[in-house]
Image (cartoon, rainbow, N blue to C red):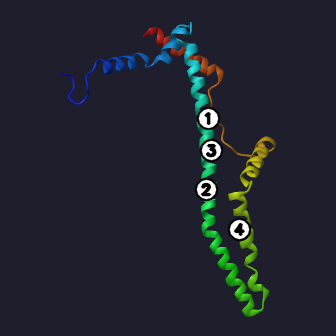
Amino acid sequence: MCCSNVSCSPVVFFSFFLMTLSMGSYYSSITKTSGEPGGAAGFSSVKKDLTASQVELARRMAERQMAMQVATVRELMVWFVPFLASSYGFLYYGYRKTKSWVVMFPLIPITFGFGYQVHFAYGNKTNQIKTLAEKIMSTEAHMMAVPEWSSPSEAQQQAQQERMKEEYRTT
């Protein structure tokens, strides 16, 4: 009697055996077929795959963040439209009472703000912002004060690969 809650059939054992054989098969096949001691080519291809997947993940996260901003503005519109409608109504009522156009003056900035929010939420404002940002990065990069990103140079990467090879040979 091996387990009380799991059926101990030969099928379960055989499927478990197949799963354990396939675990790590990608890594194992890379190190076996690389042709170099320690599988350095395999490590570099895994590193490239990892870097590519991290770049893809960062791109997806940026897209998700932009989608969240647009969704936030659209949610704000649910509150902004009734505010705008009631403002128009009350200010028009004040204009009719006082017969002075000065009472209607607050409608100008409110209308501009509403127009911007609608353009951002339902128009192509996000594409315009993206295009402008790309233009600034390509033509006016010298004006941006962005800290330097430290990435290992080729010499540092080679030295690290040599250390990994030496460590692998000693183990």
Which of pointers 2 and 3 lies earlier in the amino acid sequence? 3
Classed neighbour count for the residue bearing mark 2: other residues with Cα under 10 Å, few (<14), some (14–19), many (≥20): some
Amino acid type at image mark 2: Ala
Residue labelled with disc 3:
62
Query: Whole-percent x and y of residue 161?
Result: 56, 16
- The Cα atoms of the two marked residues, 4 and 2, are separated by 16 Å
Classed neighbour count for the residue bearing mark 1: other residues with Cα under 10 Å, few (<14), some (14–19), many (≥20): few
Callout 4: helix, strand or loop? helix
Which of pointers 1 and 2 lies earlier in the amino acid sequence? 1
Query: Whole-percent x and y of residue 43?
Result: 55, 18
Q: Nearer the viewer, mark 3 or mark 4?
A: 4
Callout 1: helix, strand or loop? helix
Where is 50 relative to 112, above or below? above
Residue labelled with disc 2:
71
Q: Nearer the viewer, residue 158 or 133?
A: 133
- The Cα atoms of the two marked residues, 3 and 4, are separated by 26 Å
Classed neighbour count for the residue bearing mark 3: other residues with Cα under 10 Å, few (<14), some (14–19), many (≥20): few
Q: Does residue 27 appear left or right of residue 60 in this picture?
A: left
Query: In the displayed image of the protein, which residue is found farthest to the right?
Result: 139
